[in-house]
Image (cartoon, helix red, strand yellow):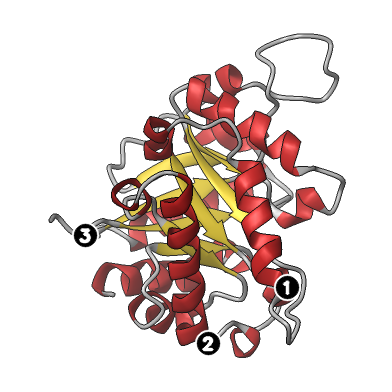
Amino acid sequence: MKKQRKIIVGNWKMYPETSERAKEIFAAISRGVRGIKKTEVVICPPSVYLPIFKKSKSKIFSLGAQNVFWEMAGAYTGEVSTKMLSEFGAKFVIVGHSERRRLGETDEAVSKKVSAVIRAGLKAIICIGESERDVNGAYFEFLKNQIKNSLSGLRPADLQKIIIAYEPIWTIGKSYNDAMKPSDIHEMSLYIKKLLSDMYSKEIAFKVPVIYGGSAEVENAFSIMSEGQVDGLLVGHKSLVPEDFIKIVKAADVA
């Protein structure tokens, strides 16, 4: 079976503050990852910057958005539709990031957004993750419910259009020293695949990429992907530091 390409997703969050700086970061990363063959790079800038990068001809890069609304049009002040994102080059959409869930986004809302993304022919990067780990293992049940609810209503064929991003919330925004151990990441990746197998089938489940986020940096990128046996990384603040992000992409290409 053909080996699946690694996926490195850069979530720029609400940075940088100017379009000029956004152009500089994108250009620097573009130069640095030339020659990459086994890795797909997805850059998710603030949506207002998508038009700047739409004309990029790189076969390495794809563009993504950090959020979307589930309706195509209507009286929804401040929201952005899948059609709008597609027009400006987005092929991926991050859905259900913990920072949005913290603002009140529910599993039901995530499910609606995922369905809208898939209907539009885009790929959904669905974020899941527990806020803390307890000795009794209750977080396993939490993740089970989060996955089932977030994927509610999806048909088996729809899973070709999703990526699961496992981000334990207690590791986000910290240093690589606080990231999960690769062995624990591998365990969680297998657990997620098992849940998907139970919901759909083993054949379908093991084709769904599972990537890791949460204090993923240069120092631990390779070990997370090789020992943790995940399909890539969701990178936060380091995706805005070109020299570091380039090293992470290159680590993925040999992991």
Three-letter code, disc 2: Lys
Q: Nearer the viewer, residue 224 or 139?
A: 139
Q: Earlier in the sequence, mark 2 or mark 1?
A: 1
Residue 35 shows which numbered tag? Answer: 3
Three-letter code, disc 3: Gly
| Residue 10 placement, left or right of 32 | right
Q: Nearer the viewer, residue 144 or 229?
A: 144
- Rendered-image quadrant of the C terminus: bottom left
What residue is shown at x 34% (from left), y 74% (from top)? 251
Measured as percent of width and height from the top left, residue 206 is found at 33, 55
Q: Secondary structure at mark 3?
A: loop
Q: Secondary structure at mark 1?
A: helix
Residue 19 shows which numbered tag? Answer: none
Residue 193 found in image quarter: bottom left
What residue is shown at x 46% (from left), y 48% (from top)? 163
Q: Which residue is mark 1?
A: 138
Which residue in the rendered view is the most extreme toward the top? 74
Up/down of 61 relative to 53, above or below: below
Q: Nearer the viewer, residue 157 or 72?
A: 157
